[in-house]
Image (cartoon, grey):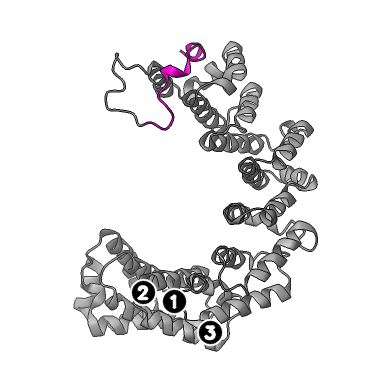
């Protein structure tokens, strides 16, 4: 069947962008190529990969014909090559096929191949056995081509490879491929810049090992800092988010850049201009700034006031994104007054937003901050006043999250009141336990 695939013309395969009809597997279907692809796809499994891939005739015909094969055939091969290598398979011919497919024009096939190659260097632990000088030269060539889509894929792949194998990272850094990401960012349009930011965001653990003091990476920082004073720029919200994630990465931002970033975001927060997309972005990254000590009391007060009074769901989601950032740290050295204030707002907002997914975020925040005594006290007071936590929810997922929160709350009550003198009456405790 695999041999036959290489002999079939493109006409017998369903066009790539077409949807399969319910009767596509019938004997009269003209797309016999797809029938064979699906048959092979269902037959191949881990138990027979070794036998199939160790057949030199099969590997030879795949290697020689793969580039000219129809999309469905290339996708079939890339899918099973990835699965084989991710499960620890070792085969030089299959490694070569994965490398060939890395440069396929279809993203799905590129993605399969990129993950497969990462498995190769991850399984062997030796980058020199795969990433030789010829392959590095090929990557450099593609990273400087006129096709910006090709360049972005190479950057994405090199980020993945660097994360998977330290030797690969050092070799790619030495040849300057990571610098090319910043060059493309500075040269291309907004859409390409957004892609570059996404790629850089995916390789955060590697950024502190790049030199941001000189070269294209330094120019990238300067360009981004200049954007902060731009009143209307499509890229700014994404740049703000990216910078918030690299605040905790050492050796990237200079102290002066950190202070400047904090100042600009605080100014945006204090403007309270809900129609400005930069404002929503600033609300969502407030948590990062708060943790780093880059927000003053006035900015914190403005954030709390916005969170307390806004009826705009976008604003609520942005605020909760920041609060989740703070809550996930579980740092008990944070300002108890601030935690208490935002917890009071959460209690009010649970009543103001009786429906919708935003309620799940409120309960998630309480779940993640339950170690703060002030949060436990707020929950006790609210339950005594409104019985909100013993009332049923209308959404199943919200109910599940609420149950988790209540379970942790009851556990904390047992810690804080070991003598059993609980501040809630017996019926309330019984109801909470039954939820």
* Residue pictured at 73% horizontal, 33% vertical: 135
Query: Which residue is tagged 3?
Result: 299
Mark 1 to mark 2 CA distance (whole Å): 9 Å
* Residue 9 lies within the magenta run: yes
Mark 2 to mark 3 CA distance (whole Å): 20 Å
Task: Say if 39 sits above or below 341 in the image.
Answer: above
Rendered image: mark on residue 312: 2
Callout 1–callout 2 Cβ contact below 8 Å: yes
Residue reaching furthest to the bottom: 298
Residues rendered magenta in the picture: 1-18
> Toward which corner of the image does residue 16 lie, by quadrant?
top left
Rendered image: mark on residue 274: 1
- Mark 1 or mark 2, which has the lower sequence index? 1
Callout 1: SS = loop
Callout 3: SS = helix
Task: Say if 120 sits above or below 220 in the image.
Answer: above
Residue 232 lies, in percent from the top left, at 55, 70
Residue 10 lies, in percent from the top left, at 47, 19
Residue 236 lies, in percent from the top left, at 57, 66
- Is residue 121 in view from this perspective? yes
Task: Say if 110 sits above or below 173 in the image.
Answer: above
């Amino acid at each position: 069947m695999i041999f036959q695939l290489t002999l079939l013309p493109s006409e017998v395969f369903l066009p790539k962008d077409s949807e399969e009809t319910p009767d596509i597997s019938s004997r009269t279907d003209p797309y016999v190529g797809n029938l064979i692809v699906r048959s092979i796809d269902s037959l191949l499994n881990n138990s027979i990969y070794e036998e199939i891939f160790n057949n030199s005739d099969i590997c030879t015909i795949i290697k020689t014909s793969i580039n000219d094969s129809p999309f469905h055939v290339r996708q079939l091969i890339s899918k099973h090559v990835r699965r084989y290598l991710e499960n620890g398979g070792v085969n030089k011919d299959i490694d070569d096929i994965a490398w060939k497919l890395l440069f396929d024009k279809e993203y799905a096939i590129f993605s399969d191949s990129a993950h497969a190659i990462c498995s190769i260097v991850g399984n062997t632990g030796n980058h020199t056995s795969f990433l030789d000088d010829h392959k590095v030269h090929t990557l450099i060539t593609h990273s400087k081509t006129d096709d910006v889509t090709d360049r972005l894929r190479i950057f994405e792949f090199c980020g993945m490879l660097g994360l998977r194998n330290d030797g690969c990272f050092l070799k790619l850094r030495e040849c300057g491929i990571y610098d090319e990401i910043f060059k493309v960012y500075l040269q291309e349009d907004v859409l390409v810049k957004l892609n570059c930011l996404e790629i850089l965001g995916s390789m955060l653990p590697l950024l502190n090992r790049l030199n941001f003091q000189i070269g294209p990476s330094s120019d990238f920082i300067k360009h981004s800092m200049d954007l902060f004073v731009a009143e209307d720029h499509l890229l700014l919200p994404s740049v703000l988010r990216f910078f918030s994630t690299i605040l905790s990465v050492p050796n990237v931002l200079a102290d002066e850049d950190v202070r400047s970033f904090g100042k600009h975001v605080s100014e945006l927060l204090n403007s309270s201009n809900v129609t400005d997309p930069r404002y929503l972005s600033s609300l969502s990254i407030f948590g990062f700034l708060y943790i780093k000590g880059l927000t003053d009391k006035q900015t914190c007060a403005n954030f709390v006031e916005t969170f307390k009074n806004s009826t705009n769901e976008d604003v609520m989601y942005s605020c909760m994104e920041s609060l989740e950032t703070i809550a996930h740290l579980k740092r008990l050295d944070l300002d108890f007054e601030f935690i208490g204030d935002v917890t009071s707002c959460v209690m009010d907002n649970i009543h103001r937003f009786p429906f919708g997914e935003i309620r799940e975020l409120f309960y998630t925040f309480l779940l993640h901050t339950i170690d703060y005594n002030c949060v436990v006290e707020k929950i006790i007071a609210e339950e005594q006043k409104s019985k909100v936590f013993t009332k049923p929810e209308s959404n199943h997922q919200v109910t599940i999250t609420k149950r988790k929160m209540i379970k942790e709350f009851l556990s904390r009550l047992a810690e804080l009141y070991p003598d059993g003198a609980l501040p809630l009456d017996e019926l309330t405790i019984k109801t909470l336990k039954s939820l």
